[in-house]
Image: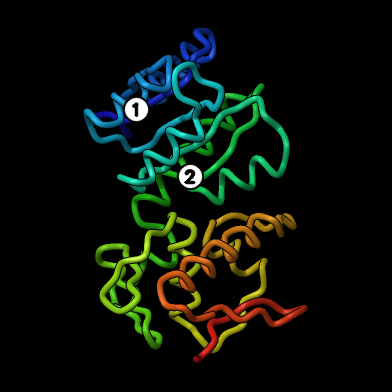
Amino acid sequence: MAKGNILIIEDNDEINSLLQEILGGAGYQVKAAYSGPEGFLYFGQEDYDLILLDLMLPGMPGEQILAKIREKSNVPVIVISAKTDIDGKVNLLGNGADDYITKPFDVREVLARIELQLKKSSGGSVAKADDEVLVFEDLKFDPSNKTLYAGDTPISLTKHEYNLIGLLIKYPEKIYSKQELFELAWDEYYIGEDKTINVHISNIRKKLFEATGKEYIDTVWGIGVRLKKQ
């Protein structure tokens, strides 16, 4: 039995073939696409446990594919790209990518990161661990369907935004440092990636304000963030 069903969207023949070989050899079922439209077509045809996504694709760029995927699914997406600028990486992580691997890559790193994402998606994170519906003023956090509501209106969140708001609502009086938020929501060691946390918190703050007209996230300077009573 296959360990998981993975979609590869990569236009470089050599890299695509290499990924197919290492993933197939590791026990995964693999589907390969070589352009943006082909990849998005395959995404709509069956369920995948994880997607490996290049950015510079013919027909449709990876950033657009990621946005389209996130409109329909929370399937883990790992970007594999030659682009190395930090701002670009942070923006992609803030817009729904679960991880980012820079080319050229080591096949062992690819396999390790895939295994980590599959472990998380199968039920590893703090926000997924408890099925209790949590309420904070106008906000309702429902782990059973992985949705945050403002009143009765669902708020669209990425997976990491969902994990972060879950932590804040579960312990609303607690002030979380950036390190705590990163390590709990990402399940990884914190290495000073302030931009990653800042982008996600900013996105959550904006979405909550658009839905409620209220500033729910309070920044305690020099310490961290928490939810603020209105």
**Image depth: mark 2 or mark 1 in front:** 1
Residue beneath disc 2: 116
Residue at (38% x, 45% y) in the render = 70
Q: Callout 1, which amino acid?
A: Phe
Residue 40 figure quarter:
top left
| Along the line of sight, the residue nearer the viewer: 180 or 133 | 133
For the point 48% across and 44% down, the residue is 116
- Mark 2 or mark 1: name the one nearer the start of the chain: 1
Q: Which one is in front, 209 or 119?
A: 209
- Is 131 placed above or below 32 here? below
The disc label shown at residue 123, or none: none
Rendered location of residue 99, percent (x, y): 54, 42
Q: Residue at x 53, y 12 (%)?
A: 12
Snapshot quadrant of residue 191: bottom right
Query: Quarter holding the N terminus?
Result: top left
> Residue 27 at x, y = what percent?
35, 25
In the drawing, does residue 170 fall left or right of residue 54?
A: left
* SS at circle 1: helix
Residues packed near mark 2 inside 10 Å, few (<14), some (14 to 19) or many (20 plus) = some
Residue at the image position 58 percent from the left and 38 percent from the top? 100
Residue 148: quadrant of the picture: bottom left
Label 2's element? helix
Amino acid on which the number 2 mark rests in the picture: Leu
Where 96 sits versus 15, above or below? below
The answer to the question of whether label 2 and label 1 lie on touching residues, with beta carbons closer than 8 A, is no
Using the numbered discs, state the Cα–Cα distance from disc 2 to disc 1 in whole angstroms. Answer: 24 Å
Q: Is residue 220 above or below residue 131?
A: below
Indicate the position of residue 201 as horizontal and vertical percent values: 58, 66
Q: Position of residue 5 (x, y in %)?
A: 31, 31
Query: Count the marks: how many?
Result: 2
Residue assigned mark 1: 40
Q: Residues within 10 Å of mark 1 (few under 14, many from 20)?
A: many
